[in-house]
């Protein structure tokens, strides 16, 4: 249920030019206050709970400032007003926990004069408290655009993690936090008896781009920006989903501290806190700086604004904090904000340009994605000439057409998207095609999405299906990247999946950039993939809605590919990972004549998917990937079988996708070097046993 009526003027496209306060009557002011409160509550809900904001952050700030101004001018204070609490409420489907200390907001502005006023106010208040107001030092750090999180450690172990929620209590996301590698399970060094820290969970830009690419390939809706991707991930009920997504976390503040017998006193300054946080093993941002005065803080912000586009994470300003913690405590808090810090915001990154054309791309699962071609425009220092429109539902929602003037937003170093139509060229909306632009097959609509029904009979789907089939997410056939696949297709050597198994060494060796050795290496790789595990084969086929976990569940339930193909919807829905929609999608895939012909051709070419043994232990380690080297208490095969039985993957080589390298006695140096090169943690057998114990798994495994 919405907090605001649909005709509330501050809900959608709200005005930000307001009448002067002294021009309002008391009755008009009270009416505007009620509307602003209702709208802000709704915006808080959309932003913090639904993760679907209706307005930009800067517009929200202007509405909030207006509400504060009217309440003060007309003495309209109300305990339930959004100005007296931190916005947002915990979602209902996660347990709610109380924070060790309030997770307050901070005042913010994009105007340097407001920053100077913060400094003057701070000096005045500290002078009144007996501090030397002439010697105020600050710590400056980036203002991360992610999800705030509280991490609580007891005797050095992670005991609880919670989202910000409403500031007093939030959602318990301990299981999710345990799957984020930047968050330590144990603290390093002499840990205090109790430590609660505040950090920001975020998705790096490069990880966001890769994750969105995978979502589109899987026929799923891409996230609009890294923050939405992070918010949608951290609240997942399945922690395995978190493990599969590239989240990171910076920690920057101590919320609670009890020394105990081992640790010393709490650090006396923010800068010393930062050093301690880093020493305990948390990820801290190295761009933070100590500055002597507010002018240096302003210079820091301006410098960071210039470097913003080069960072691998999204920031929307800088945070300026009083360095001395005793002084910060003396400044105290309001009901909503701490008085000892201020956020100096960056300007928004939006520009207006014209749509010159709209093209429709076809993904490997048949998903049709419209892309707007634009008159080139600079957005945040980058030239933008195209923007995703996501799906036909987005086109209808925006009412967009070729020739329209549109506002383009670039949230991070990612494909930009269109925020709104500023000036329509025509009353018409772009007519989405009813047939595939590549193969002319009928287009099916599924809510806001559209799909080509041609399956592997569509050349666009076929080309992308080949790329996926040989990729690490498919059968992991080395030596066949998109460029080489394009070369083979241009030479008429590769038009379908089964053509892979019919490639000729001499024909390959004759191609530019190839030779006898590289040709034979590729054929050996393809031959090794001729008897893939059934779950890997299913993943490689690009079945919509069937990722690795679902493919494994299907392979373990059905004894063979034939059994799966013959399974009806009831049999499919009996599997935990498969609901009615996914079951129908699987049935549609196998009933498509072109898809069946492609599978039959693979089998005729010698592909023989192998059964996958069932697992009966659990999924405690779901999403983790291990590599083993050296001598352990049990054989390497038994170690791999143990982690596999508990939901993890065990591979033979270290890569950027590896979570841990377990190194026993006489461990191979090459794998350890590869681990160092890819920033993969190296665990001794004792470390590995302790990690398993955290998940309730015994090591070594019993006979």
Image: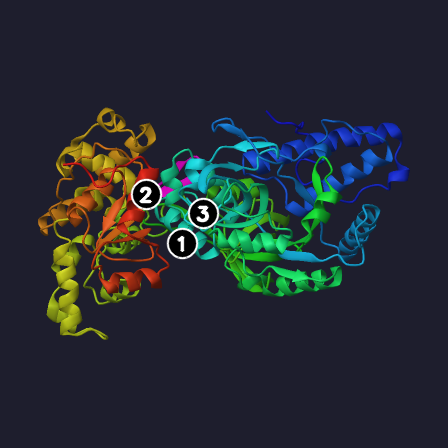
**Looking at the rendering, in which quadrant would you find the C terminus?**
top left
- 59 vs 355, left or right, is right
Residue 225 visible in the picture = no
Please provide percent x and percent y for residue 269. Answer: 65, 53
Q: In x, y percent, where is residue 642?
A: 21, 41
Query: Can you tell which mark lies on residue 187?
Result: 3
**Viewer-nearest of discs 3 and 1:** 3
Badge number at residue 690: 2
In the image, residue 207 above or below residue 694 = below
State yes or no: residue 344 in magenta. Answer: no
- Compared to residue 207, the image places residue 539 above or below, namely above
Q: State the CA–CA distance, disc 3 to disc 2.
A: 14 Å
Give the crowd class for mark 2: few <14, some 14-19, many >=20 residues within 10 Å: some
Distance of label 2 from label 1 (alpha carbons): 32 Å
Name the side, left or right, on which 411 lies relative to 544.
right
Precedes in sequence: disc 2 or disc 1: 1
Of helix, strand and loop, which one carries label 3? loop
Relative depth, front residue between 278 and 528: 278
The part of the chain drawn in magenta is 443-452
Are the residues flagged by discs 2 and 1 in contact, CB closer than 8 Å?
A: no
Q: Are marks 3 and 1 in contact (CB under 8 Å)?
A: no
Q: Nearer the viewer, residue 527 or 236?
A: 236
Residue 664: percent from the left, percent from the top? 23, 54
- Residue 210 - label: 1
* Residue 170, disc: none
Q: Nearer the viewer, mark 2 or mark 1?
A: 2
């Amino acid at each position: 249920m919405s907090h605001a009526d649909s005709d509330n003027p501050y809900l959608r496209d709200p005005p930000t030019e307001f009448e002067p306060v002294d021009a309002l009557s008391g009755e008009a002011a009270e009416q505007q206050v009620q509307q602003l409160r209702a709208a802000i509550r709704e915006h808080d809900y959309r932003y913090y709970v639904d993760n679907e904001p209706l307005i930009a952050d800067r517009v929200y700030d202007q509405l909030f400032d207006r509400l504060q101004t009217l309440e003060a001018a007309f003495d309209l204070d109300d305990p339930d007003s959004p100005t007296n609490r931190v916005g947002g409420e915990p979602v209902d489907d996660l347990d709610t926990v109380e924070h060790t200390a309030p997770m307050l907001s901070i005042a913010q502005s994009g105007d340097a004069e407001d920053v100077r006023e913060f400094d003057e106010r701070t000096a005045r208040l500290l002078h009144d408290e007996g501090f030397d107001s002439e010697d105020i030092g600050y710590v400056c750090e980036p203002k991360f655009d992610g999800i705030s999180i509280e991490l609580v450690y007891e005797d050095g172990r992670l005991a609880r993690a919670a989202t910000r929620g409403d500031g007093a209590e939030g959602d318990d996301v301990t299981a999710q936090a345990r799957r984020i590698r930047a968050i330590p399970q144990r603290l390093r060094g002499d840990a205090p008896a109790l430590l609660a820290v505040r950090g920001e969970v975020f998705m790096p830009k490069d990880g966001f781009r890769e994750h969105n690419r995978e979502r589109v390939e899987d026929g799923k809706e891409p996230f609009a920006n890294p923050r939405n991707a992070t918010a949608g991930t951290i609240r997942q009920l399945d922690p395995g989903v978190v493990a599969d997504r590239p989240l990171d976390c910076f920690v920057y503040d101590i919320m609670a501290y009890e020394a105990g017998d081992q640790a010393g006193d709490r650090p006396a300054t923010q800068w010393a806190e930062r050093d301690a946080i880093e020493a305990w093993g948390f990820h801290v941002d190295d761009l933070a700086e100590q500055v002597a005065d507010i002018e240096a803080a302003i210079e820091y912000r301006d410098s960071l604004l210039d470097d913003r586009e080069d960072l691998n994470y999204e920031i929307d300003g800088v945070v300026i904090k009083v360095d001395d913690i005793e002084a910060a405590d003396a400044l105290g808090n309001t009901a909503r904000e701490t008085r000892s810090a201020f956020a100096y915001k960056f300007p928004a990154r939006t520009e207006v340009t014209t749509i010159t054309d709209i093209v429709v791309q076809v993904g490997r699962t048949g998903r049709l994605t419209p892309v707007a071609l634009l008159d080139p425009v600079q957005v945040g220092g980058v030239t933008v000439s195209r923007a995703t429109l996501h799906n036909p539902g987005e086109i209808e929602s925006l009412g967009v057409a070729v020739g329209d003037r549109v506002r383009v937003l670039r949230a991070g170093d990612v494909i930009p998207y269109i925020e709104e139509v500023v000036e329509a060229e025509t009353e018409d909306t772009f007519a989405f095609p009813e047939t595939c632009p590549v193969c002319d097959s009928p287009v099916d609509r599924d809510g806001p999405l559209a799909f080509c029904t041609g399956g592997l009979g569509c050349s666009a789907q076929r080309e992308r299906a080949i790329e996926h089939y040989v990729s690490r997410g498919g059968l992991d056939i080395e030596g066949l990247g998109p460029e080489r696949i394009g070369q083979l297709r241009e030479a008429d050597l590769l038009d379908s999946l089964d053509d892979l198994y019919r490639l000729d060494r001499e024909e390959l060796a004759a191609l530019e950039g190839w030779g006898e050795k590289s040709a034979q290496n590729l054929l050996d790789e393809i031959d090794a993939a001729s008897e893939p595990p059934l779950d890997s084969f299913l993943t490689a086929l690009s079945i919509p809605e069937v990722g690795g976990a679902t493919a494994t569940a299907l392979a373990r339930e059905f004894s063979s590919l034939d059994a799966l193909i013959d399974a009806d919807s009831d049999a499919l829905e009996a599997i935990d990972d498969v609901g009615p929609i996914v079951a129908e999608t699987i049935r549609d895939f196998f009933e498509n004549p072109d898809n069946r012909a492609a599978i039959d051709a693979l089998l005729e070419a010698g592909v023989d998917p192998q059964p996958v043994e069932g697992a009966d232990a659990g999924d405690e380690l779901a999403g983790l990937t291990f590599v083993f080297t050296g001598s352990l208490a049990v054989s390497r095969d038994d170690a791999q079988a143990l982690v596999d039985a508990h939901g993890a993957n065990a591979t033979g080589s270290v890569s950027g996708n590896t979570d841990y390298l377990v190194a026993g006695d006489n461990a191979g140096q090459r794998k350890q070097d590869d681990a160092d090169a890819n920033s993969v943690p190296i665990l001794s057998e004792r470390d590995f046993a302790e990690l398993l114990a955290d998940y309730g798994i015994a090591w070594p495994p019993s006979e």
